[in-house]
Amino acid sequence: MIDWLAFLLVLGSALLATVIVVITYSLGIRLLTVSGRTPIVTPAEFTDAIAVVTPAEAKAAVKRAAKAAKKSPLTDGQKRVALFGARACFALSGLAALVGIYLIVPVLHGLV
């Protein structure tokens, strides 16, 4: 027999954990951008890539990010606080992922 209450409890907690991780990571990206450190990923060379970013496009993205950072109305102190907040959000989302792994793998809590 299926314990539906337990099933709903696991479903709800999984959805809540997912929402928390996504919100903290998204807020971290937003705060990182506000602090003037726009995350730019250089393109990788893949033979089966769907979309390829040319070096000129990557250079233009770096230039746009630098221009946007100069136009920021925030003071240096506010940028430091935003950067600290971004790092805290990334730490929280990483910690939530590690707790999830700990809960899933029984060897980690000595039950095996």
Image (cartoon, rainbow, N blue to C red):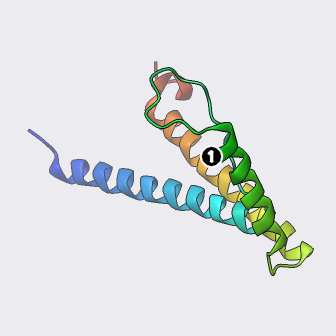
Q: Which of 23 and 106 is in front in this view?
A: 23
Q: Nearer the viewer, residue 26 or 63?
A: 63
Q: Nearer the viewer, residue 31 or 19?
A: 31
In the depicted structure, whether residue 80 falls above or below residue 52? below
Mark 1 sits on what residue? 95
- Residue 35 falls in which quadrant of the image? bottom right
Residue at 45%, 54% in the rendered image: 17
Residue at 81%, 81% in the rendered image: 73
In the depicted structure, whether residue 26 falls above or below residue 72? above
Locate the N terminus by quadrant. Answer: top left
Residue 43 locus on image (x, y percent): 63, 35
Classify residue 78 as left or right of residue 109.
right
Classify residue 24 as left or right of residue 51.
right
Residue 102 locus on image (x, y percent): 53, 34
Q: In terms of secondary structure, where does tag 1 sit?
A: helix
- Residue 9 falls in which quadrant of the image? bottom left
Quick check: can you spot residue 35?
Answer: no
In the depicted structure, whether residue 67 falls above or below residue 11? below
Classify residue 40 as left or right of residue 82.
left
Residue at 74%, 64% in the rendered image: 85
Residue at 52%, 54% in the rendered image: 21
Pointer 1 local density, CA inside 10 Å: few below 14, some 14–19, many at least 20: few
Residue 95 locus on image (x, y percent): 62, 46
The amino acid type of the residue labelled 1 equals: Leu
Q: Residue furthest left?
A: 1
In the depicted structure, whether residue 41 falls above or below residue 32? above
Quick check: can you spot residue 65?
Answer: yes
- Residue 64 falls in which quadrant of the image? bottom right
